[in-house]
């Protein structure tokens, strides 16, 4: 089963991201960039399927030159090949532009299954997987918390507001996975060494035959970026054995008890 | 460019329109122009009257059983895209549910129009613009839709209060779009509900949530006990849901539920952006955490630096003693 996993390099989620108020783009300077932790579950899911049913995992990413580091991490985990689409014109891309670029690169590779995270940790629009599926003309089974395959079809446990749905899907398909789906492996030293010699295709939008993608074509323009209204600083106490009493007083004052 | 026509995608839950659909209709009424709803469910016609009451003058109803048995994204986007061609709405409001996101993403790709996600407010004075929160609601971004129409906004739950507009019965227009064979590749074979006792998380006046700091799944029992005493509901951070401690239905946050209770009590939750985006609209926030530097304390009206496993049982004792 040939699996394509979409990955993204993001600012370390342990630091709070920022949009630059001047350029309205993601501020990448002075922030450590990492493979989106949410993507590791998709890579792991792809590796498990390829190990069970043959085939290989290809990781596809759109991003600047530096995003190569994220791809290398996926290769170190065990993916066979990387594809990085970099283009100055892609700066400021919206979700739909991103999806068009990813879909074009995925088509070029060929696939039985495309795996993504449910959303990126930095932008979290949560719509790219569905857009990619629409552009590829295949079903999208999103929010998979469980994923099994016999090599020809998929059985997915899909999160819902009230529990989960059991979904059966034929291949090819797009699946987005949550962090419940597996426990991602750590890259081994051997894997890290091997990753250095694995192939990574570097592509531009022109090489993908794409026109009309990127920031300049976005159908939306950010007009302002402002800090969200801060909550007023509250009362902070150390628990000296009396904290419970204070909490009960607080609950009484708010009239919920 | 004024808004002549706003559409709301209304989902059906247990034979009724979803709460967020009513919230969106309430907002749509204020934008000027016509307010119309789309319902894709075998029960579509049953909910039309309620949608009318909340402001829809026309309800496009798709009653194919496939809308219930298949994943809604593909067939839903096809049906709406076909309606868009005939009726040219300016704006489509879709609730940020699982099915909502699926439909919005596919519809945007199909129509080649933008979608803005995590929307908290929409305005239409001249331009159509949406306010959305980013980076765990630390920044608010105002985004203008350029000239491509329709504009699609994926709106977070509880962004608007649902109020009846006292509208009468809407005109019901059947949707006559056959579901493409390609969409039958994925189908729902079973729907499994995680049963929860007590009030619903989204409606409870007190929400008590637990995170990694509770140390062990079994410690959620003390949160359950406190919840039953104060008639509250128990929530959780994504970390413990992903770790399999508690069911997903309890998750509060970006990919979980949005809650705005009178009091939110965060126990052993550090306050990652992923979580706070779902609870920072609470009227009052109490945080209990051993780490004095935990970001949750920045949101807390009352912060207790201490072990939730000690403090919560003491609160339970106090409440019991108080009678």
Image (cartoon, rainbow, N blue to C red):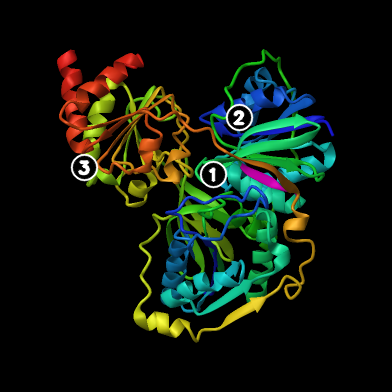
Which quarter of the figure has residue B323?
Answer: top left
Give neighbour class at mark 3: few <14, some 14-19, many 20+ (Cα, 10 Å).
few
Asked whether the viewer can see residue A165, the reply is: yes
SS label for mark 2: helix
Decide: is B208 above or below A107.
Answer: above
Residue closer to the observer: A124 or A140: A124
Q: What's the mark number on residue B21?
A: 2
Q: Earlier in the sequence, mark 3 or mark 1?
A: 1
Q: Which residues are magenta?
A: B113-117
User: What residue is rendered at 68% in x and 57% in y?
Assistant: A93
Residue closer to the observer: A177 or A230: A230
Q: According to the image, label 3 marks what residue? A: B218
Left or right relative to B313: residue B66? right
Asked whether the viewer can see residue A137, the reply is: no
Q: Is residue B224 magenta?
A: no
Left or right relative to B43: residue B230? left
Q: According to the image, label 1 marks what residue? A: B98
Task: State the CA–CA distance, disc 3 to disc 2.
Answer: 37 Å
Decide: is B141 above or below A77.
Answer: above
Is most of the magenta stretch helix, strand or loop?
Answer: strand
User: What residue is rendered at 71% in x and 49% in y?
Assistant: B108
SS label for mark 3: helix
Q: Earlier in the sequence, mark 3 or mark 2?
A: 2
Task: State the CA–CA distance, disc 3 to disc 1.
Answer: 29 Å
Q: Residue A101: horizontal and vertical position, in percent?
A: 68, 65
């Amino acid at each position: 089963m040939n699996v394509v996993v979409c990955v993204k390099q993001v600012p370390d989620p342990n630091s709070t991201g920022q949009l630059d108020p001047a350029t309205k783009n993601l501020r990448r300077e002075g922030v450590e960039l990492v493979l989106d932790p949410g993507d590791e579950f998709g890579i792991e899911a792809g590796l498990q399927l390829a190990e069970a049913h043959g085939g290989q995992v290809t990781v596809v990413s759109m991003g600047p030159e530096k995003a190569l580091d994220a791809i290398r991490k996926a290769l170190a985990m065990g993916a066979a090949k990387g594809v990085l689409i970099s283009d100055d014109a892609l700066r400021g891309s919206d979700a739909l532009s991103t999806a068009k670029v990813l879909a074009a690169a995925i088509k070029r590779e060929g696939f039985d299954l495309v795996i993504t995270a449910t959303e990126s940790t930095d932008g979290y629009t949560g719509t790219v997987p569905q857009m990619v599926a629409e552009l590829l003309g295949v079903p999208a089974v999103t929010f998979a918390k469980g994923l099994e395959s016999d090599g020809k079809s998929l059985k997915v446990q899909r999160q819902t507001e009230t529990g989960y749905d059991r979904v059966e899907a034929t291949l090819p398909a797009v699946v987005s996975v949550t962090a419940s789906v597996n426990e991602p492996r750590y890259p081994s030293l051997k894997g890290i060494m091997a990753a250095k010699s694995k192939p990574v295709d570097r592509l531009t939008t022109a090489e993908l035959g794409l026109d009309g993608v990127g920031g300049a074509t976005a159908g939306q323009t950010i007009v302002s970026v402002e800090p969200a209204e801060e909550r007023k600083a509250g009362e902070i106490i150390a628990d000296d054995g009396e904290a419970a009493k204070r909490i009960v007083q607080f609950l009484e004052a708010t009239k919920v008890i | 460019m004024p808004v002549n026509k706003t559409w709301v995608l209304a989902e059906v839950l247990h034979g009724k329109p979803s709460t967020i659909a009513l919230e969106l209709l309430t907002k749509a009424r204020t934008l000027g122009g016509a307010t119309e709803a789309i319902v894709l469910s075998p029960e579509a016609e049953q909910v039309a009257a309620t949608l009318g009451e909340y402001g829809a003058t026309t309800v496009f109803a798709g009653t194919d059983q496939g809308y219930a048995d298949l994943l809604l994204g593909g067939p839903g986007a096809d049906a709406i895209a076909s309606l868009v061609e005939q009726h040219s709405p300016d704006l489509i409001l879709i609730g940020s549910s699982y099915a909502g996101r699926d439909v919005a993403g596919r519809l945007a790709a199909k129509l080649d129009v933008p979608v803005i996600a995590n929307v908290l407010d929409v305005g239409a004075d001249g331009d159509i613009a949406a306010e959305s929160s980013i980076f765990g609601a630390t920044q608010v971004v105002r985004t203008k839709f350029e000239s491509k129409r329709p504009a699609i906004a994926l709106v977070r739950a509880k962004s608007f209060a649902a109020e009846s507009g006292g509208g009468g019965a809407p005109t019901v227009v059947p949707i006559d779009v056959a579901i493409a064979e390609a969409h039958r590749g994925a189908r729902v074979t079973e729907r499994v509900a995680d049963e929860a006792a007590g009030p619903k998380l989204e409606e409870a006046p007190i929400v008590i949530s637990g995170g990694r700091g509770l140390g062990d799944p079994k410690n959620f029992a003390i949160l359950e006990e406190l919840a039953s005493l104060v008639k509250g509901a128990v929530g959780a951070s994504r970390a413990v849901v992903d770790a399999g401690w508690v069911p997903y239905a309890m998750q509060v946050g970006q990919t979980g539920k949005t809650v705005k209770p009178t009091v939110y009590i965060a126990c052993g939750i550090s306050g990652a952006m992923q979580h706070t985006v779902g609870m920072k609209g609470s009227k009052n926030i109490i945080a209990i955490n051993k780490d004095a530097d935990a970001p949750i304390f920045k949101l807390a009206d009352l912060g207790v630096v201490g072990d939730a496993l000690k403090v919560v049982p003491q609160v339970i004792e106090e409440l019991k003693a108080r009678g």
